[in-house]
Image (cartoon, rainbow, N blue to C red):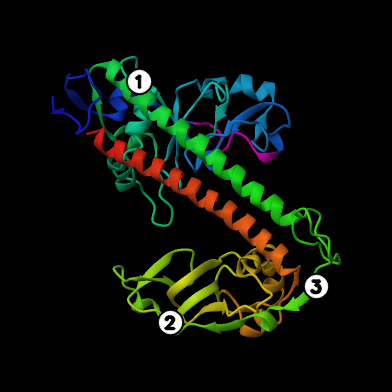
Amino acid sequence: MEVNVPEIRLKGFTEPWIQRKLGEIADIRTGPFGSTLHAEDYVNDGIPIITTEHFKSGMLPKEKTDIPQVSDEDYKRLHSYTLNTDDIVFSRVGSVDINALVSDIQNGWLFSGRVLRVRTHDNIDSQYLHYELSTVRAKNDVISRAVGQTMPSINTDILKETTIFFPIDVNEQIAIGEFLHALDENITLNEKKLDKLKQLKKGYLQQMFPRVGEVAPKVRFEGFDEPWSIRALGEISKIKTGASDVQDANPNGEFPFFVRSEKIERSSRYLFDGEAILVPGEGRIGDIYHYVNGKFDFHQRVYKISDFAKDVNGKFILYTMQKTFKQHAMTYTVKATVDSLRLPMLVGFNLQLPSLQEQTAIGNFFYNLDSQITTQSQKVEQLKELKAAYLQKMFV
């Protein structure tokens, strides 16, 4: 018997860990539906069936909506393929290294022929096993034995051979599972907060800028009531592309380097010093914007919008573009292998502007909201990184 211990252990546990194959500590079964049911067999209000696409992110659905369901008659025939609370499910194809833990919500649901169900023996805590199977080591083990060139595929025999490490003391298993489950709940809570902030911004973007054909928005700050005017982006700013390429990036560079993605690289030089909006010239047109006020470098296929007119607030331009530019851009985009943006599309883009004072109020409002979104997003990422570190150090 091979004995192993992880780098980090919860206080009070000293018993050794042991190594086994998954098939030795759990029963593994494939669902029945490959040739048993067809689309016409599904009903609107029956027993849900978990299929591959329902847990690609590692989370099972919590509602029956949009999930295939079978009649009571078919359920009686297939009841042996029912999921129980604390079962673990894997996809047989595609993301074969991702597993999900069945909760009380999915208890009694069925699983399809493209799903593998893992049901642990009495001396193994399911929640612990769920996290053990989520470690990089275990995931790589599964992937290394998957078959298929274009799409990975596994079966019961392949999954049974997955190497598992666990503490002999089931109480340690339970403690580890509960610890990581609490961390997962914290991640979920903060993801919900992040989503609420994003939805809040989306709602305000809809209400704080005029609709097509209107001269004032639905929601305004107190004290502003004058109609908005139409100006072309080329009239109120200077627009040009950069002169750098990807090979100019330097991870240790002093200055931010804006390229054709959301990721900001670093550069040892700067091409501009001041307030600007950066927009990629190809790819996800209308989805990516960067605002900067200082020294920076930028790619030859990135547009810099800068040198704003005296009666124009740069932050306001950023958010009115986020609200309205994509529709304009996609109407006139140049299609090659990807959507492409040309200078006239920016120069001729018409936008509605209120007074400078109202622009400033709106720009600052959204900029502060974006700061909250960034802070919350960083918190979520930090929690995910923390979980990844624990998955590495709390398991063998």
**For residue 229, which numbered disc appears in the image?**
3
Q: Residues within 10 Å of mark 2 (few under 14, many from 20)?
A: some
Q: Earlier in the sequence, mark 2 or mark 1?
A: 1
In the rendered view, tell whether residue 260 sits above or below residue 375. below
How far across and how far down the image is residue 253, in percent?
A: 31, 71
Question: Magenta stretch?
Answer: 31-39
Q: Which residue is painted at 46% across and 37% down in the image?
A: 187
**Could you tell me how far apart the alpha carbons at marks 3 and 1 are, in whole angstroms?**
65 Å
Q: Horizontally, is 396 left or right of 297 in the view?
A: left
Q: Which residue is painted at 29% across and 68% down in the image?
A: 252
Q: Quadrant of residue 259?
A: bottom left
**For residue 271, which numbered disc appears in the image?**
2
Residue toward you, 353 or 185: 353
Q: Horizontally, is 389 left or right of 229 in the view?
A: left
Q: What secondary structure characterizes most of the magenta part?
A: loop
Q: Which residue is painted at 43% across and 74% down in the image?
A: 296
Would residue 285 be visible to someone looking at this image? yes
Q: Quadrant of residue 170?
A: top left
Type of amino acid at the residue the image marks with label 3: Ser
